């Protein structure tokens, strides 16, 4: 059966769903809409009104944000753009169906995202509620490209999103889909389940550095999979939670040369810590690319996208059937409007939360790339030098070793690192995962009343700040540890920019002063274990 021959059940469910969406849905409070249309990670604690990462749905400028990860608050400019976008959609919906007006808005966002990233109009964009959902979209399309269900090889399985272990195998990664369907976590998605092979990046001998044999291992597992008559979806990392990239370009060149039609590459660029030239390099080579509007760009979590190289859409002609469970993970508006046959199979299911989070993210992406490129490069370099120096000087922080020689000219401002992971020490001894997590949570709270001490200590303890959530690090001869992360995000660069060079320099120094304050608070929290744990 060709993709254009829709089953009656598909047509029925698409037509039935269209009547469920009304203009009144857009009058839901903006804060509520911004955390809708996703999985449980968006849920707010009913008492403190923040999600599991310590972030609320509305701007909180009093929080210093050095997470540049899933733990990101929405800025005032992003919030205002989301509010304006909703007003515009309400107005347009007075003259047209909500779903039709919404579809046009999504198509406009595709154009804007391509424009900001300097991508060809022939690059397709598939939106989703999160990078994790986009991984399922990539698996679905890889099946079409390769002609058979592939085995997924995940490079950096120990440093990607926690849901990847499930999505790589075509399994549910939460207990609720973004479309509101209750599911069992890690249960097979109907008609979609497959196999996966994990290639971790952490060096088993040290537990604090990247292994040196990644390329060799990637080639080995590909060879073994192909020898079994299987096709491969190779999930590569650029970059991981610790800011690492793997495998090398040399390794990828060999894979393309040896197995051009047996291996489909998807780049996990959800962190968005790569230059636009490198992004185009991946797409020009026929790779799919996963990205998000949160993390580096600082939009509200969660907002996913799958970027597809020109020509890949031709593989849609080979799709004969769609796994029944996959319909719960995509709506018609997620797919480009040019994909008419595929779109007709999916429900008319506008995801207002997903759309508004992307509108907010585009405000940040546009603001970032409006800053002159030379300033972006200079500021990223100055922040990197300053952060490295402060971590090295702290007796309670130990930097996680960064791989050398992985950056090149295509990385542009990302020639410099933008993620700075470190583990914690107390009296020169490693801090446990549970205590590291307690410090992470306490950083986001006003700890003035809990810690006390001098006026200076109370001032430090009172400041709420966000850093990147803990990353688990398996240790070769002891209990696992966890790394916290200081992240340089787009918003820091945007806020530092000024046409007055002296003012810009003062702005950068102000950011470094705040980072120093965060590190002092970490030291203070480590000295007050009981208060932090409580």
Image (cartoon, rainbow, N blue to C red):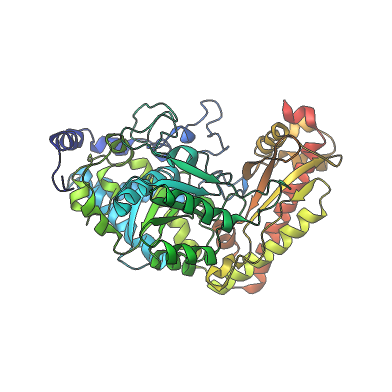
In the displayed image of the protein, which residue is found farthest to the front?
A: 227
Figure check: 445 above or below 244: above
- Is 304 or 386 nearer to us in this picture? 304
- Is 162 or 61 nearer to us in this picture? 162
Figure check: 411 above or below 463: below
Residue 75 can be seen, yes or no? no
Which residue is pictured at 56% across the width and 43% down the height?
71
Q: Position of residue 448 (x, y in %)?
A: 74, 34
Which residue is pictured at 44% across the width and 46% down the height?
152
Q: Position of residue 480 (x, y in %)?
A: 70, 36
Q: Position of residue 3 (x, y in %)?
A: 18, 48
- Is 251 or 343 nearer to us in this picture? 251
In the displayed image of the protein, which residue is found farthest to the right?
A: 427
Which residue is pictured at 55% across the width and 68% down the height?
411
Quadrant containing the C terminus in the rendered view: top right
Query: Number of callouts in the render?
Result: 0
Quadrant containing the N terminus in the rendered view: top left
- Is 480 or 44 nearer to us in this picture? 480
Figure check: 313 above or below 203: below
In this picture, residue 273 sits left or right of residue 302: right
Residue 153 can be seen, yes or no? yes
Q: Position of residue 221 (x, y in %)?
A: 51, 50
Figure check: 465 above or below 253: above
In this picture, residue 349 sits left or right of residue 263: left
In this picture, residue 332 sits left or right of residue 361: left
């Amino acid at each position: 059966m060709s993709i254009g021959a829709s089953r009656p059940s598909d047509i029925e469910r698409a037509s039935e769903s269209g009547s469920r969406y009304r203009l009144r849905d857009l009058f839901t409070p903006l804060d509520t809409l911004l955390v809708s249309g996703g999985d449980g990670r968006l849920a707010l604690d009913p008492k403190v009104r923040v999600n599991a990462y310590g972030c609320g749905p509305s701007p909180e400028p009093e929080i210093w944000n050095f997470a540049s990860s899933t733990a990101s608050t929405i800025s005032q400019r992003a919030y205002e753009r989301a509010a304006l976008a909703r007003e515009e959609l309400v107005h347009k919906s007075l003259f047209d169906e909500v779903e039709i007006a919404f579809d046009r808005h999504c198509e406009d966002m595709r154009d804007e995202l391509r424009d900001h990233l300097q991508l060809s109009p022939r690059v397709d964009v598939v939106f989703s509620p999160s990078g994790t959902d986009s991984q399922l979209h990539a698996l679905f399309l890889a099946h079409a490209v390769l002609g058979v269900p592939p085995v997924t090889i995940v490079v950096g399985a120990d440093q990607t999103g926690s849901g990847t272990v499930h999505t790589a195998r075509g399994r549910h990664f939460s207990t609720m889909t973004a479309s509101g369907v209750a599911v069992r976590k890690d249960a097979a998605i109907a008609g979609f389940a497959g196999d996966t092979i994990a290639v971790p990046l952490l060096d088993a001998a040290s537990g604090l550095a990247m292994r040196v044999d990644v390329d060799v291992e990637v080639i080995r597992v590909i060879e073994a999979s192909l020898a079994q008559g299987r096709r491969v979806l190779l999930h590569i990392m650029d970059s991981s939670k610790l800011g690492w990239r793997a495998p090398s370009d040399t390794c990828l060149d060999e894979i393309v040369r040896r197995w051009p039609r047996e291996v489909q590459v998807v780049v996990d660029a959800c962190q968005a810590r790569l230059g636009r030239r490198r992004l185009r390099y991946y797409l020009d080579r026929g790779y799919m690319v996963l990205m998000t509007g949160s993390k580096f760009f600082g939009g509200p979590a969660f907002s996913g996208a799958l970027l597809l190289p020109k020509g890949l859409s031709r593989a849609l002609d080979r799709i004969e059937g769609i796994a029944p469970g996959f319909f719960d993970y995509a709506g018609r508006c997620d797919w480009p409007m040019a994909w008419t046959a595929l779109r007709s199979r999916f429900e008319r299911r506008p995801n207002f939360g997903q759309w508004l989070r992307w509108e907010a993210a585009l405000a940040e992406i546009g603001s970032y790339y409006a800053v002159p490129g030379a300033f972006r490069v200079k500021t990223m370099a100055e922040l990197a030098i300053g952060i490295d120096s402060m971590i090295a000087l702290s007796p309670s922080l130990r930097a996680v070793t960064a791989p050398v020689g992985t950056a090149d000219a295509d990385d542009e401002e990302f020639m410099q690192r933008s993620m700075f992971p470190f583990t914690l020490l107390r009296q020169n001894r490693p801090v446990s995962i549970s205590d590291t997590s307690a410090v992470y949570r306490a950083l986001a709270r006003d700890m003035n009343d809990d810690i006390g001490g001098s006026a200076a200590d109370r001032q430090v303890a009172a400041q709420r700040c966000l850093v990147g959530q803990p990353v688990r690090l398996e240790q070769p001869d002891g209990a696992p540890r966890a790394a916290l992360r200081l992240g340089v995000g787009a918003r820091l660069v945007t806020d530092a920019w000024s046409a007055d060079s002296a003012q810009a320099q003062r702005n950068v120094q102000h950011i470094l002063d705040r980072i120093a304050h965060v590190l002092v608070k970490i030291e203070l929290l480590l000295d007050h274990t009981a208060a932090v744990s409580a």
